[in-house]
Amino acid sequence: MAYRGRVERMIVPKETDLDAAVADTWEWAPLYPIMVHKCTFIYSEATDAAIATPGVVSLDHTPSGAARVEKATYTAEVSQSIGTEKELTTLVPFAVATGDKLHFEHKTQQTATEVGQGYFMLYYEPITDHNIG
């Protein structure tokens, strides 16, 4: 397959509060096929030097008509400052077809004094019809 070779970035337009109840932060169904290369979590609020229970976020993929699959996770770390960008681990680049969904999930509630908040950033490559060879 031939791709455009241009990786684009998208920040998820909803903040994830790590001490809030666990739930999907945001869901996205791309209008065209994409190749996901990387997903990160960017802190918008600092975390404390002591975290009793670290928060966990994940990127999940639901192919059209199939079961939801976890693709990558990140466990919050102590003493993270505002603007720190951390990559979700275990992500192997994968294709997302039209009709599939991506879920940006807050999996585990964090407990600490300064609990932290942040945004997901997705790095992906559009795969348009004229780029598939």
Image (cartoon, rainbow, N blue to C red):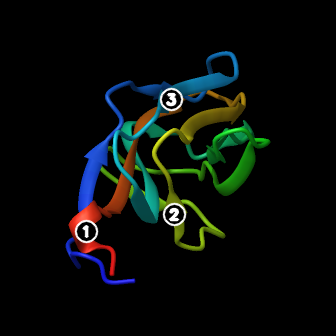
**Which residue in the protein does label 3 denote?**
27
- Residues tagged 2 and 3 counted as in contact (Cβ below 8 A): no
Determine which quarter of the picture holds residue 107. Answer: top right
Residue assigned mark 1 = 7
Residue 66 pos. (x, y %): 76, 43
From this view, report whether residue 122 is shown above or below residue 27: below
Question: Which dot marks residue 85?
Answer: none
Point 62% across, 66% down: residue? 89
Position of residue 3 in the picture relative to residue 14 (left or right): left
> Quick one: 6 or 107, which is closer to the camera?
6
Q: Is residue 88 above or below residue 64?
A: below
> Disc 1 and disc 2: Cα gap in Å?
13 Å
Judging by the rendered image, the residue that carries numbered circle 2 is 95
Element type at mark 1: loop
For the N terminus, the quadrant is bottom left
**Local crowd at mark 3 within 10 Å, few (<14), some, or many (≥20)?**
some
Q: Are marks 1 and 2 in contact (CB under 8 Å)?
A: no
Residue 111 on image: x %, y %: 70, 28
Name the mark nearer the viewer: 2 or 3.
2
> Picture quarter containing residue 44?
top left
Return the disc, 1 or 2, that comes first in the chain's sequence: 1
Q: In front: 34, or 24?
A: 34
What's under tag 1, amino acid-wise? Val
Q: Please, what is the three-letter code of the amino acid marked with disc 2? A: Ala
- The amino acid type of the residue labelled 3 equals Glu
Q: Which structural element holds mark 2? A: strand
